[in-house]
Image (tube, rainbow, N blue to C red):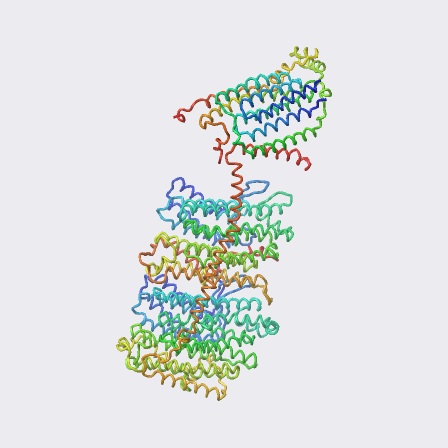
Amino acid sequence: MPSLLFYLFALITLGFGLMVVLARNPVTSALSLAMSFVGLAALFISLDAFFIGTIQILVYAGAVMVLFLFIIMLLDIKAESDRKTNVAAIVGAIVLGSVLAVQIATVSAAHHQSDLTLNEAALNLVAAGNQMAATDKDLPTISKDLKAGILPDTKLMGLALFKQYGFHLQVMGLLLMVGTVGVVVLSKRDKEVAR
Amino acid sequence: MSPLEIVILLPLLAALAIWLGAPARATSVGAAVVNLVITLGLVFSFKAASAGKAGFAFESARIVLDNPAITFGVGADGVALILTLLTALVTFAAVWQIGDDKPAIYHIASLLIAAGALGAFLSTDVFFLYAFHELALIPTFLMIGLYGHGEPEHRKAVAWKTTIYLGAGSLILLAGLVWLVLEFSGGGKLTFDLQALRAQAALTPLPIEKQAQIFFVLLLGFGTLVSLFPLHSWAAPAYATAPTPVAMLHSGVLKKFGLYGLLRIALPLLPQGAQVAWVQEALLFMLLGNILVMGLVTINQKRLDDVLANSSVMHMGYIFLGLAAGTEIALRGAVLLMFAHGISIALLFALAGRMRNQLGTLEFSKLGGLGEHAPAFTVLFAFGAFASIGLPGLANFAGELMVFVGSFMNYGSTSFGPLQWAVIVSLWGVVMSAVYMLRAYRSLFHGSAMSGLFMRDPSFSQRLPLILLAAVLLIVGCCPWLLLNLIKSDLAAVVAP
Amino acid sequence: MITLSHYLVVSGILFALGLAGVVARRNIIIIYMCLEMMLSAANLTLVAFSRFHVLAGLPDYSAQALVFFTITVAAAEVAVGLAIIVALYRSKQSVEVESVTKLQG
Amino acid sequence: MTPPAQDTTASLPTLLLMLPFLTALSILLGHKLLKGASVVLSIASAAICFVISLMLLDARDSAPMLLPFIEIGKFRIGLDAMIDQQSRGMMFIVTSIGLLVHLFSLGYMKEDEGKVRFFGSLSLFMFSMTGIVLAGNLFMMFIFWELVGLSSYLLIGHWFEKPSAAEACKKAFLTNRIGDFGFMIGILMLFMANHGDVSFSGLKGGFAEGPLHEMTQTHTLFMTLAALGIFMGAVGKSAQFPLHVWLPDAMEGPTPVSALIHAATMVAAGVFMLVRCSFVIEASPDAATIIAWIGGLTALMAALMATQQNDIKRVLAYSTLSQLGYMVMAVGLLAIQVSVNHHEAGPGHPAMFHLYTHAFFKAMLFLGSGAIIYACHHEQDIWKMGGLMKHMPVTFVTFAIGTASLMGVPFITSGFWSKESILGVGFEACRPLFWIGVATAMLTAFYMTRMFVITFLGKPRTESAHHAIEAPIIMVLPLVVLAALTVLSTFESFNRLLAAMIPNHAEDHPTVMIASIAALIIGSSVGFLLYRGKNSDPLNIKLFANKFYFDEIYAVIVKVLQDQLAWIVNGLERMFVDGIVARLPAFIAMRIGSAARILTGGHLQAYTFLLGAGVLMVIYLVVFVLPQLGH
């Protein structure tokens, strides 16, 4: 059953991904990408990464794709016309894409853990909970959840982010701010240029 | 601080000073004169300084890097000293004759070229030897491109051609040098020091075939810089286009770097490489190309600057002949010829530049009878022209004679090898050079004066550096032993056993 | 059963699709979308490795933290990128790549 | 830095050599200060040289080292003199005629603007010529060989404003250069064969019992080529066929120069050098034969050309050519005699004897012609002269003595004896050449009579000839002195001073004397009868008048072999050398560049494609290649 779901969502992801590339109409592309992201989010969740799956939908399929659509609508971009199709670019794309796919397939087939199934790599939440209760006395809710056999994904994520990657998180915040400022500057019409 | 370092630094500092706003002419001439005086002092004290001592005189070394071992080392043997003297003389003449109407960059460029050449001649470290030469090339390119003669399109094209050509040559050279250093390091510490490399070469010479290969690569690299046939086609347009001081310095001095490099690096480190049959034959083929092909090409030229430029390419053949012969006499002859050619071609380019300034053209068909109103000019030109066609009594002859004689030192042999045949063919080149030089002389100075063309003798102060060059040609031509005595045993090590 | 390599292959194909799209398409916005797709493909790889690299009974959260950051950066990047596209559109009245040839040296 | 120690006995020759050089140098540097004094300086130095050469006449034979030139270890090329009978005698000729010509020039060049330059060049010439005469080795000889070429160039081109003079000096220098080309090859071959010793004494020793001795038997071709190489130097300098074309043109120079350089001394240097190197030629019978024939051919051909010239100096020039041919022929003939017939060579040499007598009377003839030209306001065409006998009596007498000597009037002229000794050798060594010599003698008598009759006898044909007056005393004096020397040189007692010049005179075959006297009588009487009282040339032989069309033929050869070849090579060099080495790579680079330009033309897609390809390449290298290499 889980494998069937995997195939379903993989198909959604890749199928809509293909649509993104192939569709002439940018709106179609954008909506397809949103769908592809939804499929991807499902795959994340199938890997027990609930938090990531959620923000994938929230941030990507929600915010980012809306932004894309918004711009497309704003600029009123039409579909590409046929005659402008660049054969060289398409051939190059196919070649590059297929060679890359083959390479990645070869690499992943050669990976020493590639045959590992989800069952074989099963999580041992109780043991983890016990260990954490012994070492981290400050985090009772996590160890309590773990001991109960529940994966407190968001809490663990937060633990990792704030405990291990606190500095990086702050840098990221700075980056976002710089991005915000950048967008403001870029969007501002340069009066000199406009004139 | 070794006096040699001062000699190298002085032009650099003077160039810097001019760039910062010092009076251009006074500074550059002052630096050139001081350099000339120091160099003469070095020449006279050389015997004492080098007495009872192997290797270089006036040595000093500053370590730059430990591994690979790179030192800023300077030192002079007779060969280096002769070329230093050449540089000092030509630099003096070149900066002196720059007109007052020329921008300061003329002086800066000339001084930079001089400093680069001096550095290259006096460095005892292969790395700096190479680097200094590159330093001198940059102003050459710039000056050709910015202030060259002719249409802007033309001079830009020439500048690019020169840049690319010499750049490629330098790259080949670099490859050869790196190969050489790698071979000699043998997995141990890399060293660029010439003395160390020579010691290594004496201790464990490379296999002969490898010597030949490296020698050939170096020959191509250095050869491009010296305009060895068929890698010469940059030289003639470059000299014909370059501003006068640059033409003087490059053809007179800087070009000798390639020959000096072969003499300094290739021959001592790869003594058997040059004597391997295929290398020898290739070299002879190329130098005969220089002499015969370029001789005929020069005969066909219709303008003085083209004649001088092409003849300068042609005369390199004789110096290469000396290197190819490889006997002590021939090598000394080659050194003497380097000096003599440098002085004579610098003199001729200086005169050609002056003519161009006064008359606006150098085309033979438009000139004639200049000897009537400019006798001193004519005499100076005659010195340069007759020196370059190898007239006895002027410096070039002694060098050429030694090269020829040195090639015929296989005593008792009754059959001619390729070398001897090459000498005989190059002797015909002497006839050809007389043909084009006398034709040029005839159409410029003889005959009745053309209407509308009038040339005055330069004033005495303008003549001074030219007289100096002519006097050097005469003195060295009459007493070549003055210079030859400086070369004591430097070349003994070079000669293949 | 589903193995690690299943996920990796899906990720790889997605990445390849994205790359092909970037090369083939001329519309800058779509190229941008394809870039996002490639980023997501990388994210999938990370998450997959995170799940299959069990540390003390739990997935490796360092990888997921990286994915978190990637998504954050991607969001910022999209904002800036789209702003650039808008600015470009203003000056060129087009979002076709042919209109952007100023990169020429 | 110190020059090597000098031989103490060398001071006199050193002075002899260096004095004219220093004079020339100081005239070059200080002509503005010295002004007219430089002329005096030049003449003074010539006079001192003459005195020195007189002092040397009874000096011992020696071989002092004068000045160092190139010295490296055991290897030495130096200015080493060789003082022996031959060089002493030649030195006497050079300095005596030199001094007289200096004096003559003082009158002849009085009005000339370039007088100072002229005397400076004369001093340079005296320096170079002294060097040739003193030379003790071939390298020194070569050095001065070229230097006389330079001074001859400067003097022929003295009036360089005249295009003909400018062309003539160029031609002279270049033709000599071609000769020097062979000379140098010859020197280098001997240098190689004789283990680096090319001093005359060393070479002589080498031929006697050194390395060269054996080679004359075993390597005849090598020795022949070496001898011919040396000979080629003489061919250029002494204007032998086929390099004879420069000498008649050299008459563009001032007449004193023609007398000194192109009649008496420099052109004779080739013969002098051949006699110096006679052992080289004697070692190779083939070379000797070739030399003798070239000399004979030149003598005959030049005499034929002389019969149809109208320029007084050109007649003399062709006559000089012819006489030089005689001397060269003598060198070859004597060598044949020594090498084939194994005659012992005597102390003197017929060629040197003829050189010696010829120098005086030919210099006199030239100076005489100079006086005539001066008197006739620079008119050189003999058909515009005539009747000068009355106007210029001294010139007439001296000219007559010279003409008689040149024609070889029996028993009372020096020219007769020297010609006789050559014909004597020819009779024994090579009969055909003997007859060529006789024919030349006959032609000589003919053209000299012709010129003499036209110039001096009859009536003046033009105004300038009519108003001609005797030249000033400064010009007449040298003529008289030379005439005296010419007459004196007939007598053996005078000639004892110059012993090396005079071959020991064996009794000649009577045929020789009869033939030469007959030739004289036939030639001069035909000339006299044909030209007496004529106002234009009754003969008109285009072939001779146009010098066998050598100039035209050479012009074509030079044009094709040099100018057009140069043009073609220049084109090929541009096309192929520059093309293959420079422009082809440039073209390829440009094509690659423009191909790459499509990818990097600012097209975003192209960049992305490259990026993708690069990523693939990195993956390929990292994942698939590096593990193979063991990383």
The residue closer to the viewer here, D312 or D282, is: D312
Q: Is residue D396 visible?
A: yes
Residue D505, image x and y in percent?
Answer: 48, 85
Numbered marks: total: 0
- Using residue A141 as the reference point, say whether residue B486 is left or right of it: left
Q: Quadrant of residue A48?
A: top right
- Say if B197 sits above or below B496 in the image: above
- Say if D276 sits above or below A182 in the image: below
Residue A110, image x and y in percent?
Answer: 70, 30
- Say if C56 sits above or below B383 in the image: above
The residue closer to the viewer here, D235 or C3, is: C3
Residue D238, image x and y in percent?
Answer: 45, 72
- Using residue D205 as the reference point, say whether residue A137 is left or right of it: right
Q: Is residue B461 visible?
A: no
The residue closer to the viewer here, C96 or C87, is: C96
- Using residue B70 as the reference point, say whether residue B477 is left or right of it: left
- Using residue C104 as the reference point, say whether residue C5 is left or right of it: right
Q: Quadrant of residue D166?
A: bottom left
Residue B190, image x and y in percent?
Answer: 60, 43
Q: Quadrant of residue C54?
A: top right
